[in-house]
Structures are given as C-alpha cells and as structure tokens.
Image (tube, helix red, strand yellow):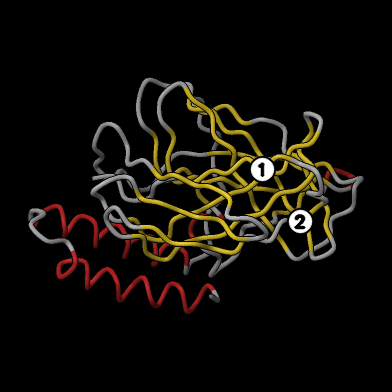
Amino acid sequence: MAPSVRWAWLAAAAAAIVLLSGCVSTQRIAARARLVDARVLASQTMPALVRANPAVSVGSPLVIRGVGGSAVVITVRNDSTHVLTDLPIWIGIRRRKGRVEYLNRSVNLDYFSTHVASLVPRSSVTWVFTTARRLSSRVRAFAVVGFPQFHPSFSRPLPRIAVSSRGGSAVSVTNRSAIPQYDLPVYAVAVRAGRDVAAGQASVAHLGTRGQTAVNMTLLGNPRGAALRLIALPTIFS
C-alpha cells in the first residue's frame, strides 16, 4: 500500500475506532484516535532535525545491499527506567568532504520509517529502514535518535505482538493483547554465522484485539541458509 493511501486509510480508521472498541472507555478510545491522527499529520510535514536523546544508545548502522535496494539495520537501546515511545530517528550517510545526506528525512514517508515505535526500559530492539536506492558499500551510515513529540499513555506491560515465519516471504503477526494496533511495523533480519546478511520491513495497517494476520516480507541481501529474527513493536499502548 502506497504511503498516501495508507495514511488516508489510517485517518479514516481513527474516526472508526469508537465503533470497533467494544466496552473500552470513551476517553481511552478518543486518546487512541487522537494519537493515530497526530501521527498521520506528522508524516505529511517535513520533519525537523533532531537532537540526540541521552537516554537512548544507538548502535553503528549496518548497510545491507540487495538487488532491489538497500536496508539499514540499527540496534537501539533504552538506557532509562521509563517506557519510551514515538522516538524520531534519522538515518543518513556521510560522503566525501563531510557532506551529509539523510535517507529518511522527507514528506509522506510512513511515520514508523522516521520513528521507533516503542522501547521498554533497559532493553534493545532492532530497527530496520529500507530504500530503493542501492547504496555504495563505501558509504558511512549514521543514526540519531531524538526526543519524542508525542507522549501517549501506556499500560504495563506493553502489548505483546508475536511474529513467526510461515515459510517463503510470508510472516504471521499475532496481537496477544486486548489493545488494537494501527500501522504496526514489522522487521526481519536474516543472520548467518553471527552476521546480519539480509533485512526487510513491512507494516500492518490494522491488527485487532487478539487478531492475527500475515504480511509478505521482502528481504534485501542474501538470506539463503540464514536464521530469521523477527520483530514487531506495538504502536498503541493502552
């Protein structure tokens, strides 16, 4: 689904949340709808550059090249004792003479192509960005994670999203919680002999309470003979 179509769908979904949420309180339903709508609006404007968040450690980005483009794989760690959500993340490359080029600073990208959805305290997650560009193996990539613009309420623990391979390019995604999810990001990294050799990302527009769905995941790189690591980060938290 193209970004503009997906965001139009999500904007409509925000208005429909009331009808789909059963006996959940009106206040909570409204809060979910406002969050979805705010993310839609944020994705339609040119994002400002971010200041590094000292509560977050960012690993060195790994660039993986494939036939259809490139994937950037990054480990992000929450060093704080608090749940962090909606963290802006900028991915860039450094060229000769110190020139910097950002890969994901543009209008109408999916919101979670420029944000880390959620991080629990004292833990790390893998985040993946993909681009149709075939980046040179000689470029130096970097990433900066900033301070969130939104501060949604959350329940403890955060909603659990289970992900498993169904063979081939199909991935099964299951919502183990009673909290519906919108624009849910799903990441895959293929690991062989301790090295990340392929990666990809996809998103689920809507995953209902205790719901299950399947998405197709295109991996950039060479996943042959590799083990697959799958990640899905919740986007609605209470």
Which residue reaches farthest front? 167
Q: Position of residue 4 (x, y in %)?
A: 50, 77
Q: Report the amino acid beneath label 2.
A: Leu
Q: What residue do we see at 33% from left, 45% from top?
A: 176
Q: What residue do we see at 79% from left, 36% from top?
A: 192
| Label 1: element kind | strand
Cβ atoms under marks 2 and 1 closer than 8 Å: no
Q: What residue do we see at 35% from left, 50% from top?
A: 175
Density class for disc 1 (Cα within 10 Å; few <14, some 14-19, many ≥20) is some
In the displayed structure, 87 sits above or below 101; it is above
Q: CA distance from mark 2 to mark 1?
A: 13 Å
Image quadrant where residue 161 sits: top left
User: Badge 1 is on which residue?
Assistant: 228
Density class for disc 2 (Cα within 10 Å; few <14, some 14-19, many ≥20) is many
| Label 2: element kind | strand
In the picture, the quarter occupied by the C terminus is: top left
In the displayed structure, 195 sits above or below 9; it is above
Q: Position of residue 73 (x, y in %)?
A: 69, 43
Image quadrant where residue 194 sits: top right
In the displayed structure, 192 sits above or below 81; it is below
What label sits on residue 220 in the rendered view? Answer: 2
Q: Nearer the viewer, residue 41 or 132?
A: 132
Direction from residue 41 to residue 96 in the image, left or right:
right
Q: Report the amino acid beneath label 1.
A: Leu
Image quadrant where residue 39 sits: bottom left
